Image (cartoon, rainbow, N blue to C red):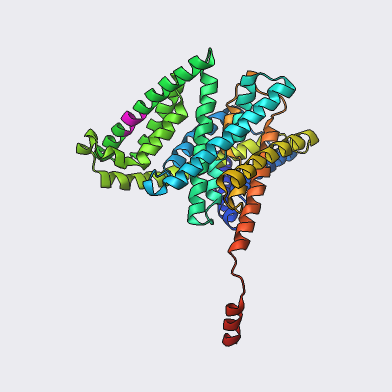
């Protein structure tokens, strides 16, 4: 039995890898294939009466690890350079405003027309308002450099804003003013902890000569995240700041730790750490989506009401995006308008909503349908962008062809 389990796990990892490679060619993100693989395994298990143990309780654990890794990976790509301040400003404002507008309108509709509590409405709206960095960044590989950077910054900051607000809404008690003041204080404490933690890890990374040290860094990050959660601090904000400081480690060169850290060596180690982190994230993300697909109720994906709700929410997402890009940013719609996918971050935050705060018609199946719809629209953007880049056969090209003949 042990050998069969190992065999299945190996096949799943290889298939996930092939899905990732295939996705870059056919413009279909691997997450779609992974969910369908999970659904296929579900059908096979039912048809063969295969006794698979209930692993659903493990799903939030894998999801939390994936969330920490994704936030860390995304933050390590955020270089805060002066030369990019215009691009960074546009992407930050786009991420914040689109997230805030969607969440506000979603909350207003649920409160005013369906009589749901404000807090429940906000918490359920936040996961839907966040762009998935893990899906958007990997799908933006073929875009122009400035367009790709916009996608990286916008999706990463969208994740960051959504996570911070989600943590704030869940953690704070009492009045709104008390919640804001507590959040500001906890955020300042989080920044201090992140700076101190980064400095300690930088020194340790510089001093450790034993060949195993990247695993210790990752374990330390997860440990600090869990401790922050237990202390009711914005834990994912801590991970985000930690990653930002690592990515922009030049700010530490003029501090006291410069005596203890060889920064060229530190940056070289950081590049290796990013590679390992990327591969671990791939593995955790793959297992999560396959398990997520396995436990989806397939009949729910075909339910007319669920499809209608998903289409309405997806339409709202892109309607706000169209208005903002056309009227405020005044940017070309192709391809950036299409890059607003939902994905792992949406699922993870949705699963993190306490049962007492859940809204009945926002189900896992609705979330899955929204992911499918937004990714499908992103695929259209990639196809249209590819067509725009195709060389046009003008007179000069035609003359050259005739001469060659």
Q: Is residue 391 visible?
A: yes
Q: Residue at x 40, y 32 (%)?
A: 221
> Residue at 54% of width from left, 27% of height from top?
166
Q: How many marks?
A: 0
x and y percentages locating residue 250 in the rendered image:
30, 42
Observer-nearest of 312 and 229: 312
Task: For the C terminus, give its image quadrant.
Answer: bottom right
Tell me where residue 188 appears, x and y as whole percent.
Answer: 38, 24
Q: Residue furthest left?
A: 259
For residue 347, what is the image quadrant? top right
Say which quarter of the image contains residue 385. Answer: bottom right
Q: Which of the image's four quarters has the N terminus?
A: top right
Where are the magenta residues, as a range?
Answer: 194-198
Q: Is residue 338 magenta?
A: no
Q: Residue furthest top?
A: 174
Residue depicted at 52% across the width and 30% down the height: 163
Q: Quadrant of residue 198?
A: top left
Residue 368 against residue 192 in the figure, above or below = below
Residue 146 screen position, x and y as percent:
48, 53
Query: As rendered, which of 184 and 220 lies closer to the eye?
Result: 184
Main SS of the magenta part reads: helix
Residue 329 percent coordinates (x, y): 55, 46
Up-down relation of residue 48 to residue 237 (above or below): below
Query: Looking at the image, which residue is at 26% across and 35% down?
Result: 203
């Amino acid at each position: 039995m042990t050998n069969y389990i190992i065999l299945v796990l190996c096949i799943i990892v290889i298939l996930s890898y092939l899905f990732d490679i295939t996705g870059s060619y056919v413009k279909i993100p691997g997450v779609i294939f992974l969910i369908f693989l999970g659904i296929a395994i579900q059908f096979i298990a039912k048809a063969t009466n295969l006794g698979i143990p209930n692993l659903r309780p493990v799903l939030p654990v894998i999801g939390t690890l994936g969330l920490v890794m994704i936030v860390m990976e995304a933050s390590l790509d955020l270089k805060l350079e002066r030369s990019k301040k215009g691009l960074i400003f546009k992407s930050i404002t786009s991420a914040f405003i689109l997230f805030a507008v969607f969440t506000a309108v979603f909350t207003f509709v649920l409160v005013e027309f369906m009589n749901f509590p404000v807090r429940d409405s906000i918490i359920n709206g936040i996961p839907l308002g966040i762009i998935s960095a893990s899906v958007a960044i990997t799908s933006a590989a073929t875009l122009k450099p400035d367009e790709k950077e916009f996608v990286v910054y916008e999706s990463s900051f969208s994740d960051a804003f959504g996570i911070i607000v989600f943590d704030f809404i869940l953690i704070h008690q009492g009045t709104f003013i008390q919640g804001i003041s507590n959040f500001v204080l906890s955020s300042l404490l989080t920044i201090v902890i992140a700076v101190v933690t980064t400095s300690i890890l930088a020194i340790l990374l510089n001093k450790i000569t034993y060949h195993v040290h990247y695993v210790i860094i990752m374990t330390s990050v997860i440990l600090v995240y869990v401790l922050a959660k237990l202390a009711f601090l914005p834990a994912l904000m801590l991970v985000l700041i930690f990653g930002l400081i690592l990515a922009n480690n030049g700010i530490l060169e003029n501090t006291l730790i410069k005596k203890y850290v060889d920064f060229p060596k530190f940056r070289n180690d950081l590049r290796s750490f990013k590679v390992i982190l990327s591969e671990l994230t791939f593995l955790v993300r793959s297992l999560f989506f396959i398990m997520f697909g396995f436990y989806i109720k397939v009949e729910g994906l075909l339910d007319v009401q669920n499809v209608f709700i998903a289409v309405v929410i997806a339409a709202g997402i892109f309607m706000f995006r169209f208005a903002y890009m056309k009227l405020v940013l005044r940017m070309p719609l192709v391809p950036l308008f299409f890059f607003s996918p939902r994905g792992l971050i949406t699922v993870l935050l949705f699963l993190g909503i306490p049962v007492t705060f859940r809204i009945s018609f926002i189900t896992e199946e609705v979330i899955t349908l929204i992911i499918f719809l937004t990714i499908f629209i992103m695929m259209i953007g990639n196809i249209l962008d590819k067509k725009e880049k195709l060389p046009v056969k003008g007179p000069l090209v035609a003359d050259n062809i005739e001469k060659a003949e």
